Amino acid sequence: MKILITSLLLALVALSPALAQTTVDAKDIMAKINRKEAISYQNATITGDLDLTSLANRKEVRDGNWGDSQHYLSTVDVPMTFKNCTFKGKFLGYRTEDQDGKIFRTSNTVYNTDFPEAVTIEGCTFEDDATFKYSTFSQRAIFSNNKFEKVALFKYTKFRNDADFSSATFQGYADFKYTKFDEASTFQKARFERSADFKYTKFDEGTNFSQARFTGNADFKYTRLPSGSNFDETRFDGSTDFKYTTLGGRRFLPYGR
């Protein structure tokens, strides 16, 4: 009996770390990236802003002369995986310098981030803004089953490989305007509870919006959808704009509108 109790206690001790929700400071994650360590977290709460625009390898890519915006680029050059995590602060792959109070502002300073390695963020909650404007994802990018409580900014983002947003919930503004998908993309069963902007979005391969639901405004104006794109059982409960939208070169108006 004593041996059995001892074995049970040892099993509980071994199991408890897996059951516990780990708390991680965002600065510790940035430090790992700077050390070129692969990022992998599961069942973790991330505190503070994860500012990937301020990595050690950040470099100036446009000097901002003659009134142009000054641009800086950071690169996450290690694979990055988050599963069932909660981000309490902002997740920043893009930001601009605070110019409040500058009366004679003639240009802006832009910081953004590229991801040459695979990115997997599944089953996570973003409690604050998630910004990836101008970012390039070179390998597969998985954002499935996530909840974006505030802004999800993917404007001008380039996905060079497959992109997966299936079963994601966008509670705030979902901005995919001018986004470019080079390979297959899916928003199957995604939920857009406020405005969803896919205006001028470019899909080089067929995209999947089957069983997605748009509660707020859905803007697909000027979007060109390749043949093979899927809108089966998609619901549009709010206002829509499909002006000049085409599917396989023909005017497109989805069912469920």
Image (spheres, grey):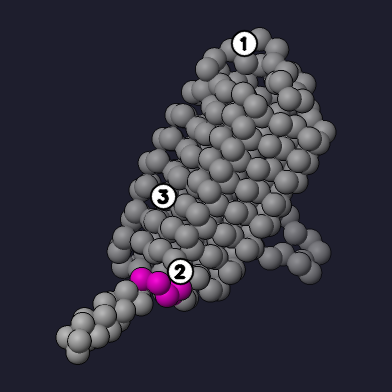
- Residue 111 can be seen in this image: no
Give the residue displayed 57% in from the left and 59% down from the top.
125
* Residue at the outermost top position: 250
Front position among marks 2 and 3: 2
Q: Under tag 1, what secondary structure?
A: loop
The span from disc 2 to disc 1 (Cα, nearest Å) is 45 Å
Give the residue displayed 39% in from the left and 64% down from the top.
41
Give the residue displayed 26% in from the left and 80% down from the top.
8
Q: Which residue is identified by label 1?
A: 249
In the image, taking residue 223 as reference, residue 6 lies left or right, namely left
Q: Under tag 3, what secondary structure?
A: strand
Quadrant for the N terminus, please: bottom left
Give the residue displayed 66% in from the left and 29% down from the top.
234
Q: Which kind of residue does numbered mark 3 sit on? A: Val
The span from disc 1 to disc 3 (Cα, nearest Å) is 32 Å
**Span highlighted in magenta in the image:** 18-22
The dot on residue 55 is none
Q: Which residue is identified by label 3?
A: 119
- Residue 209 can be seen in this image: yes
Disc on the earlier residue, 2 or 1: 2
Q: Which residue is identified by label 2?
A: 44
Circle 2 residues within 10 Å: few <14, some 14–19, many ≥20: some
Q: Nearer the viewer, residue 125 or 137?
A: 125
Q: Magenta includes 119? A: no
Q: Which kind of residue does numbered mark 2 sit on? A: Ala
In the image, taking residue 32 as reference, residue 152 lies left or right, namely right
